[in-house]
Image (cartoon, rainbow, N blue to C red):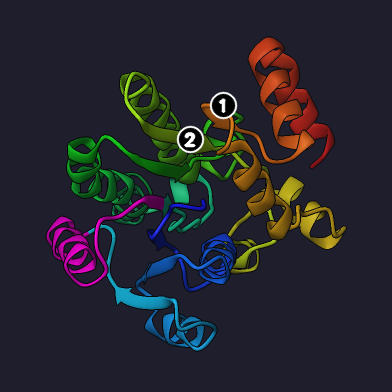
């Protein structure tokens, strides 16, 4: 991080994007904070003179292209991207409209693609940079009422891991972050929508992971050669159970419901 000058962080208005932005700014990095939530961005801007805000809808490819060009023009070459922007509406497949599912995919997956597509060329030209993409164990470990979100994160997981493999011979560091459920504003969807009972129990029981711990794990693992960061033990545990005991996974989910 010592030679990092500019970092672009999406989902910066809240949650782990906001925590990452504040930590980077405190370390002297100029942060381009990106979110569709302008009120949250304006609040974040008051935290540090090293934070500049760039309101943007990640699902709009033209808007992302314009935003990245502005960041590069106003702040300079981007040394790190942390793509934490996402939404998490929940519910049974039969109860979700095609538009709501497709919109989720546009933000969570296509938003990731839009960011990478516009930042990667300059990083490749310089042969340097860090790309941190937020996938999720939800993209590996299925749970009822999470079909749309899990599908979007499965897409991000595959996209990020393959991107890392394709760039492994370069000096561009790509890391996919796969957290378990974490105490961020995304959890509002648990109250607002038809959430799985297992998640409701975790929320009510205070069993959500601390977002500060997740960001600390990211900063630790980005200094290694790990392609996938499982920030907490439960994330790795769940992923291994699903991989090696797929039938038992559903029994475990039902038991915790």
If you read the primary sequence from the N terminus, does the residue marked by circle 2 or circle 1 appear first? 2
* Magenta highlight on residue 68: yes
Q: Position of residue 171 (x, y in %)?
A: 35, 30
Residue 186's image quarter?
bottom right
Q: Position of residue 94 (x, y in %)?
A: 45, 45
User: What is the magenta range?
Assistant: 60-81
Q: Provide the major secondary structure of the magenta segment.
A: helix
Spot the residue most to the top.
244
Which residue is at the front of the view, 45 or 126? 126
Residue 32's image quarter?
bottom left
The quarter of the picture where the C terminus appears is top right
Cα gap from disc 2 to disc 1, whole angstroms: 7 Å
Q: Residue at x 39, y 60 (%)?
A: 5
- Return the residue at label 1: 226
Q: Residues within 10 Å of mark 1 (few under 14, many from 20)?
A: some
Q: Is residue 116 above or below residue 62?
A: above
Q: Position of residue 60 (x, y in %)?
A: 19, 60
Residue 78's image quarter?
bottom left
Q: Is residue 180 above or below residue 58?
A: above
Q: Secondary structure at mark 1?
A: loop
- Return the residue at label 2: 175
* Magenta highlight on residue 147: no
Q: Residue at x 57, y 71 (%)?
A: 26
Q: Residue at x 16, y 67 (%)?
A: 73
Q: Is residue 163 above or below residue 217?
A: above
Q: Are marks 2 and 1 in contact (CB under 8 Å)?
A: yes
**Left or right of residue 113: residue 53:** right
């Amino acid at each position: 991080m010592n030679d990092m000058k500019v970092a672009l962080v999406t989902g910066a208005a809240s949650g782990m994007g906001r925590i990452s932005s504040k930590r980077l700014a405190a370390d002297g990095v100029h942060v381009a904070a990106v979110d569709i939530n302008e009120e949250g961005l304006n609040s974040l801007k008051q935290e540090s003179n090293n934070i500049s805000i760039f309101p943007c809808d990640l699902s709009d490819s033209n808007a992302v292209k314009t935003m990245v060009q502005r960041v590069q023009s106003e702040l300079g070459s981007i040394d790190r991207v942390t793509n934490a922007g996402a939404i998490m509406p929940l519910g049974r497949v039969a109860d979700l409209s095609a538009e709501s599912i497709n919109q989720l995919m546009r933000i969570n997956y296509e938003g990731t693609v839009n960011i990478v597509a516009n930042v990667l060329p300059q990083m490749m030209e310089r042969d340097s940079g860090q790309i941190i993409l937020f996938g999720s164990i939800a993209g590996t470990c299925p749970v009822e009422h999470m079909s749309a979100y899990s599908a979007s994160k499965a897409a991000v997981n595959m996209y990020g891991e393959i991107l890392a493999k394709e760039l492994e011979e370069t000096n561009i560091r790509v890391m996919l972050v796969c957290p378990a459920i974490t105490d961020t504003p995304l959890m509002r969807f648990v109250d607002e929508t038809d959430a799985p009972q297992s998640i409701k129990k975790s929320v009510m029981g205070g069993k959500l992971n601390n977002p500060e711990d997740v960001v600390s794990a990211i900063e630790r693992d980005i200094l290694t050669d790990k392609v996938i960061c499982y920030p907490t033990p439960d994330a790795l545990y769940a992923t291994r159970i699903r991989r090696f005991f797929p039938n038992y996974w559903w029994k475990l989910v039902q038991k915790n419901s």
